Amino acid sequence: MNIIKDINKELLDIFEKAGYPVESIELKPSQRKDLGDFQINDCMKLASVYHKAPVQIANDIKELLDKDDKFTNVNIAGPGFINITLSDNYIIDSVNKIVPNPEDLIEKLSDETVVIDYGGANVAKALHVGHLRSANIGEALKRLAQKVGYKVVGDAHLGDYGRPLGFVETEIKRRYPDLPFFDENFEGNYDDVELPISNEDLEEIYPIASAKAKEDEEYLEEGRIITNKIQHHEKGYYDLWKRIVDISKADIKTCYDELNVDFELWNGESDAVEYFDDLDKLVKEKNLVRESEGAQVIDVAEETDKIDIPPLLYIKSNGSISYATTDLCTLVQRKKENDPDEIWYVVDHRQSLHFTQVFRAIEKLGVFKQDQLTHVGYGTMNGSDGKPYKTRDGGIMTLKALLEEVYESTLNRINNDKVTKEEAPEIAKKVSIAALKYADLTPSVDTDYIFDIEKFTDIEGKTGPYVLYSTIRMKSLLNNAKDMDNNKISYIDNDLKEMYLSILDLPNVLEKAINAKSLNDITDYLYIITSQFNTFYAKNKVLTEEDLDKRTTWLTLTKVLFEISNTLLDILAIEVPEKM
Ligand code: ARG
């Protein structure tokens, strides 16, 4: 249900009836609530079309609006702006319609299939702060898209292919040369071989191995050869690679679990590369590659480009596949396995050139059209120096360390009167995740923002803890109310009207969010409704109110707000604790 759309349709009819047919009408929330809830400015534009004074057109429209009992206080301001106010009855009736199920406010906006590529974790490498926004934004977009009707497939798209893993095996081989994985004559089952390496070891090995490969020519060469063996599924090396992927994946999963992030697909780049032959056939058919300094490239520049778009690197001069080519393979794979209408890539905005190249190349290959593919490029989370957030000593901040930091800060702020020592850790966990997610989703997707732990974990202000606290307050009010069987709104005043209008605006908030592929409209909205509720709650003694109509109205309103708040927090993948 979307009353704004209903009213829009009705206004179109009225304009037509009055003799001024128009394509669309702009119904703007009024800046001056004393004049009306909404303002219609279209008479100004129509004046030149019909060669009439705008005020004359406005008067003709007003005459019809006055006859419609949805509207009251229709008045004309200035040279021809029409102010309208929705009648109390219309507002109350509209809210009552959704009282039994507030989710009726959520419209189906699409039935398309969309693959959302988010996560992008790399095997054998710790998740770091850079992965946080992809996980948070991707998961929330996925849940939002599902709510508004999309069929959604989330794909973790693991970075499990390429030289870094060859180097990791090189290092393992040097440390444990006697492991059966390196023994050509080994006859047993690799799955039974005990591996003396944990996920922590992998995280320690990865940077060391990469650094050694940069300095040591011999190491580099060995790494190259091993990478090649892995990529050709050579016995032993390939089996070790699979074990490394499993260890790492298990750890990556636990980390995503903490963020309430879950993927339908755990495909990796290596799965996509299986489609290289299919891709290469298309590339050859279309005759798209050319030699450039020993490498093979695909030209993707277009005449209208304002900046230089270099060719896509297809095959590197050393014969290996580039990152862009793994993405082309992934598109061939997705076409075949999921055949989606759209694909959204939730990846750091610094990769925008990469995606421009990939999207153009795949269109040239006739697999997907560019307008089916969207790079949802997000800004970075920065430290107070304006650079990507680091540890105190300037190192890369792992996601685990970041979560721990936010958890500690939240635990210190937990209210000891309400929460026992035993309950505190679990509650602090949920609240800390809420604090981090809400802060991460509040700036619009493409902007950078500064990590400010004190601000994010504060229970006052536009924060996750504030929204959670307010939601829990709604719930406890409902729990303490005994006469909730009479679910009906029958009373209105200025404060209530504002809340009713907020409630009825929900479908437009969701539509705006999905169109922008950004969650900030939802975090804003949550802050608005919880703040409105808190103001109302401070002013009124709901439970002891004697006027039954008032009390029932208040409690019904609280129930609706509580359910909306829960639905939206669930879209943001934020869990609500029992208390805090
Ligand atoms: N693993 C990549 C990285 O760490 C991100 C992958 C993003 N997704 C994609 N389809 N390219 O940079």
Image (cartoon, rainbow, N blue to C red):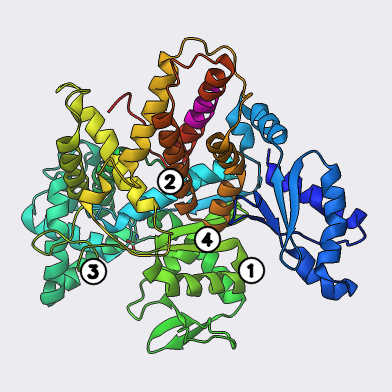
Q: Are marks 1 and 3 in contact (CB under 8 Å)?
A: no
Neighbor class of circle 1 (other Cα within 10 Å; few <14, some 14-19, many 20+) is: few
Neighbor class of circle 4 (other Cα within 10 Å; few <14, some 14-19, many 20+) is: many
Horizontal arrangement in the rendering, residue 479 relative to residue 228 (left or right) = right
- The percent coordinates of residue 13 (x first, y second) are 86, 51
Q: Nearer the viewer, residue 404 or 363?
A: 404
Q: CA distance from mark 2 to mark 3?
A: 25 Å
Q: Are marks 2 and 3 in contact (CB under 8 Å)?
A: no
Neighbor class of circle 2 (other Cα within 10 Å; few <14, some 14-19, many 20+) is: many
Q: CA distance from mark 1 to mark 4?
A: 11 Å
Q: Earlier along the polypeptide chain: callout 1 or callout 2?
A: 2
Name the residue that disc number 4 marks. Answer: 331
Q: CA distance from mark 1 to mark 2?
A: 29 Å
Q: Amino acid at mark 4?
A: Leu
Name the residue that disc number 3 marks. Answer: 387
Q: Secondary structure at mark 4?
A: helix
Quarter of the image holding residue 418?
Answer: top left
Label placed on residue 139 = 2
Horizontal arrangement in the rendering, residue 454 relative to residue 38 (left or right) = left
* For discs 2 and 3, the disc positioned in front in the rendered view: 3
Q: Secondary structure at mark 2?
A: helix
Q: Relative to 428, is 187 above or below?
A: below
> In the image, is residue 110 part of the stretch drawn in magenta?
no
Q: Earlier along the polypeptide chain: callout 4 or callout 2?
A: 2
Q: CA distance from mark 4 to mark 2?
A: 21 Å
Name the residue that disc number 1 marks. Answer: 366
Segment colored magenta: 556-563
Q: Secondary structure at mark 3?
A: loop
Q: Residue at x 55, y 74 (%)?
A: 360
Q: CA distance from mark 4 to mark 3?
A: 33 Å
